[in-house]
Amino acid sequence: MTLNEAVISRHSVRKYINKAIEPEIVKELQKTIDDCNEKSGLLFHLQLNEPEAFGSGMATYGKFEGCSNYITVVGKKEDEEKCGYYGEQIVLRAQQLGLNTCWVALTYNKSKIVCEIPKGEKLLIVIALGYGQTQGHPRPTKSVEELSKIKNGDMPEWFRKAMESVQLAPTAINQQKFVFVLDGDLVEAKTLLGFYARIDLGIAKYHFEIGAGDTFFRWK
Ligand SMILES: Cc1cc2nc3c(=O)[nH]c(=O)nc-3n(C[C@H](O)[C@H](O)[C@H](O)COP(=O)(O)O)c2cc1C
């Protein structure tokens, strides 16, 4: 599965079957996690066979079922964009490995999370993962025109493709509170007001890069 295919097939999944993740899949996913930890300076940590965080309270209210694995993301508040950018690399790798995922900021039982948090840092978010009961469902999206702005002339084909990948990026409550502005070969990705909007922005920027493929552009 290519990254573009992973972008298309990924949907949030909240109900999982009772099956442990195979050791060779864990090993592959761990390589991406290690790589993201090294590049981001954040701490992504995989917790396996830990059903409690998704077994009660907010999690069941949030319609989670059978989730026994998750990744904790620990860092500083100002690292939220990085958290999204690198976390989505792990999410899409998981998709390529046949797993399902869901970013979760609120609907889990925080007191049951297994996680060490150094002074001055916080648990930014968790990512639920495992084998889904289904592959999830496509959901509505804002149009490319609503999500972007072209400073001069018409929208180039490569930019439209990149924005189609952005449309498929997961965002908190599907809010899609951002706009991508193209000015020559410069792209500025701006957040609008919203909960966890900076995490969303990091996720969307990674999707943009995947959709842009080999086309040269620079982030402003
Ligand atoms: C930053 C962030 C926080 C999220 N928090 C929650 C959450 O607390 N509970 C939940 O059930 N889903 C949560 N989600 C999942 C979103 O609801 C989901 O990604 C969005 O509705 C788009 O659907 P899709 O992921 O299937 O494309 C979150 C997603 C993101 C990116």
Image (tube, grey):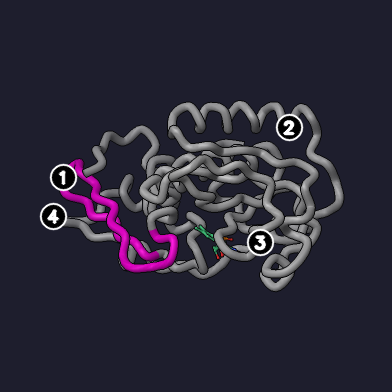
Q: Mark 3 points at which residue?
A: 108
Using the numbered discs, state the Cα–Cα distance from disc 1 to disc 3 in whole angstroms. Answer: 43 Å
Q: What residue type is labelled 3?
A: Tyr
With respect to residue 62, does 16 lie above or below? above
In the rendered image, residue 193, in percent from the top left (x then y), is placed at 33, 68
Instruction: Report helix, strand or loop for mark 1.
Output: loop
Callout 1 touching callout 4 (CB < 8 Å):
yes
Which residue: 78% across, 61% down? 55
- Kindly give the residue lying farthest to the front in the view shown: 119
Q: Name the residue under label 4.
A: 152
Instruction: Identify the image quadrant of the N terminus.
Output: top right
Nearest to the observer: residue 10 or residue 118: 118
Instruction: Identify the image quadrant of the C terminus.
Output: top left
Q: How many badges with numbers are in the image?
A: 4
Q: Residue 192 carries which label?
A: none
Of the numbered discs 4 and 2, the one sitting upstream in the chain is 2
Which residue: 48% across, 27% down? 38
Please give left or right for residue 132 compared with residue 92 in the image: right
With respect to residue 166, does 97 lie above or below? above
Q: Name the residue under label 1.
A: 184
